[in-house]
Image: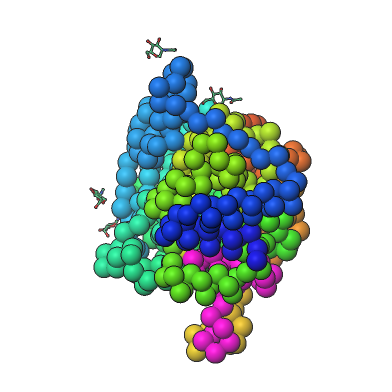
Amino acid sequence: MTFFSVLVFSVVLLNSVNSSQTFEIFTRATDAFKSFLNIELITVDKPRSTGDSNETDSVAEDATLLAPDLIRKYQYPVEVHNVTTDDGYILQVFRIPKPDQQPVLLMHGLLDTSDTWILMGPQQGLAYLLSDLGYDVWMGNVRGNRYSNRHSILSPMSRKYWDFSLDEIGYYDIPAIVDHVLNQTNYPKLHYIGHSQGNAVFFVMCSERPEYANKIYSMHGLAPIAFFSTVRSPVINSMVASIDFLRILTATLRIYEFLPNSEFLTKSTRIMCHDASIVQAVCSNMLFLLAGFNTDQLNKTMLPVALGHTPSGASVKQMIHFAQLIKSGHFRKYDYGRFRNDMRYGTTEPPDYNLLNVKMPVSLYYSENDWLLDVESVQKLSTLLPNVQDKYLIPLKQFNHLDFCWAVDGRKIVYGRLLENMQIAESNGNLFS
Ligand SMILES: *[C@@H]1O[C@H](CO)[C@@H](O)[C@H](O)[C@H]1NC(C)=O
Ligand SMILES: *[C@@H]1O[C@H](CO)[C@@H](O)[C@H](O)[C@H]1NC(C)=O
Ligand SMILES: *[C@@H]1O[C@H](CO)[C@@H](O)[C@H](O)[C@H]1NC(C)=O
Ligand SMILES: *[C@@H]1O[C@H](CO)[C@@H](O)[C@H](O)[C@H]1NC(C)=O
């Protein structure tokens, strides 16, 4: 059995019986996993609220604050907007307003939230940088994460609520947010910046609703996921390998939500991540198993903040969709099986997304130490996109999937280039309008 299955099983068992026996099984599995990977795990010094310095207190506070309070704490203005999609999901969108200035929309990655753009603080966060430079900054949250967990009719406890994949996020959520931003600002176009899944769902929108290409000045893909060729993350690979098992397990246990910020994790982390537990290191390291280790761009002091805000919920179906993309190597719609595909799509295989509809200038930023997205996948994407403005391989070898949002030197390494590309797109746009 793969590590991931052991993990899921253990958590389920621990939640119900909490016996020392299951705990031991889990510990042994973890040890085996560690030696298999042969990596140095990162340990987190928990900030104590009775800590001896103000910095420690501040870090502990940042770990628990929700986005609006976090933004206010650093003396930026903030607005909270509710956006209702055509299929009834209520999404929270945060804005650091600069009225009458060019709007920029930031979309987070998988299991993440808009917090990713602000949680490393004003010196590092891309949202703050854009605001300082005079942009009107909007940060969306897709359905199912901790900020966008409401629906006009459905309960988030129901199976139907969680019945969505990247298809629905791209078809409903992103267009609804884009329309809301343009409506509120009276601008004809916005700049779009996506991280990880935030790119895939953007391409889904362009493919399925081509009229939206006219609403985007330029698109910037940080670790732009669409195709997968070689995934190096062992967590993801074991998940893909056990996909059928997981599908049955989650359906049997009626688990529709994957790694939510609240219940599932607090329940399991209470048991697994207590002090002095060897598995605690694994709790802290789940993120890096997903994203790539050995980066020196992570400020370890801020790790509790990162782990306080991530992971933050997705649907099991969405995870299965990702696994299907990894397995097939295609960027295409959810695979319901031959028979149901035929009923739904008129073909036994799911149709590929049409990247020719991504007509606005697109810039791609990617790196070698990204365990989710290898360089080849980005090459493939760039050859299929019709209007690539820039393709930028981060010169730092160790740069990983999360560094695009969290890197200590993000401004120097990525954001400078990104801003330049935005300005070029703007001046070209003005030239032709
Ligand atoms: C913490 O900050 C308060 C006021 O903000 C100050 O009075 C106090 O000396 C600081 N403590 C330390 C340990 O820096
Ligand atoms: C958004 O929804 C929340 C929860 O229902 C509500 O408290 C808040 O007032 C709403 N905000 C706006 C701007 O409508
Ligand atoms: C924004 O949306 C409101 C309500 O749907 C609509 O009445 C208004 O005309 C829209 N404004 C713009 C500038 O599109
Ligand atoms: C790391 O984070 C701490 C706490 O926010 C901060 O004081 C420190 O300057 C940061 N270090 C770097 C290298 O940015």
Q: Position of residue 148 (x, y in %)?
A: 37, 55
Image point 58% across, 73% down: which residue? 245
Image point 62% across, 69% down: which residue? 242
- Front residue of 400/258: it is 258
Q: Is residue 305 above or below residue 199?
A: above
327 in magenta? yes
Image point 56% across, 58% down: which residue? 7
- Front residue of 160/217: it is 160
- How many discs mark residues in the rendered view? 0
> Residue 72 is drawn in which quadrant?
top left
Ligand 4 image-quadrant field: top right
Evaluate whether residue 103 shows in this view: no
Evaluate whether residue 82 shows in this view: yes
Image point 45% across, 54% down: which residue? 18
Provide the residue span drawn in magenta.
316-342
Q: Is residue 164 left or right of residue 420?
A: left
- By secondary structure, the bulk of the magenta-drawn segment is best described as helix
- Front residue of 69/315: it is 315
Q: Is residue 72 left or right of residue 47?
A: left
- Front residue of 142/36: it is 36
319 in magenta? yes
Q: Position of residue 150 (x, y in %)?
A: 31, 59
Q: How is the image coloured?
A: rainbow
Which quadrant of the rendered structure holds the N terminus? bottom right
Q: Is residue 99 left or right of residue 19?
A: left
Q: Position of residue 94 (x, y in %)?
A: 38, 45
Q: Position of residue 329 (x, y in %)?
A: 69, 69
Q: Is residue 49 left or right of residue 347?
A: left
> Residue 102 is drawn in which quadrant?
top left
> Residue 177 is drawn in which quadrant?
bottom left
